[in-house]
Image (cartoon, grey):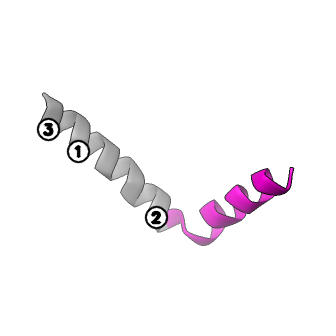
Amino acid sequence: MAQQKKNHGIFSLDPLLAFENAISATTQRRNLK
């Protein structure tokens, strides 16, 4: 439960980081094509 709270806090404090990660994953998929 503590771990879940910690992860949630990270996402709440760093939404841009999560956004960057999503873009990176999408870019990698495009590169694979």
Disc on the earlier residue, 2 or 3: 2
> Which is the main secondary structure of the residues drawn in magenta?
helix
Whole-percent x, y for residue 2 in the image: 84, 56
Label 1 sits on a secondary structure element that is: helix
Above or below residue 31? Residue 24 is: below
Distance from the alpha carbon under mark 2 to that under mark 1: 15 Å
| Residue hosting label 1 | 27
- As shown in the figure, which amino acid type bears the numbered disc 1? Thr
Mark 1 crowdedness (10 Å alpha carbons): few <14, some 14-19, many ≥20:
few
Mark 3 crowdedness (10 Å alpha carbons): few <14, some 14-19, many ≥20:
few
Distance from the alpha carbon under mark 3 to that under mark 1: 6 Å
Is mark 3 in CB contact (under 8 Å) with mark 1?
yes
- As shown in the figure, which amino acid type bears the numbered disc 2? Leu
Residue lying at the far bottom of the rendered structure? 13
Residue plotted at (40% across, 54% down): 21
| Residue hosting label 3 | 31
15 on left or right of 23: right
Whole-percent x, y for residue 18 in the image: 48, 57
Q: Quadrant of the C terminus?
A: top left
Please identify the quarter of the rendering in which residue 13 is found. Answer: bottom right
Label 2 sits on a secondary structure element that is: helix
| Residue hosting label 2 | 17
13 on left or right of 4: left
Q: Which of these two is toward me, 12 or 32?
A: 32
Q: Which of these two is toward me, 19 or 7?
A: 7
Magenta stretch in the rendered image: 1-15
7 on left or right of 26: right
Above or below residue 18? Residue 26 is: above
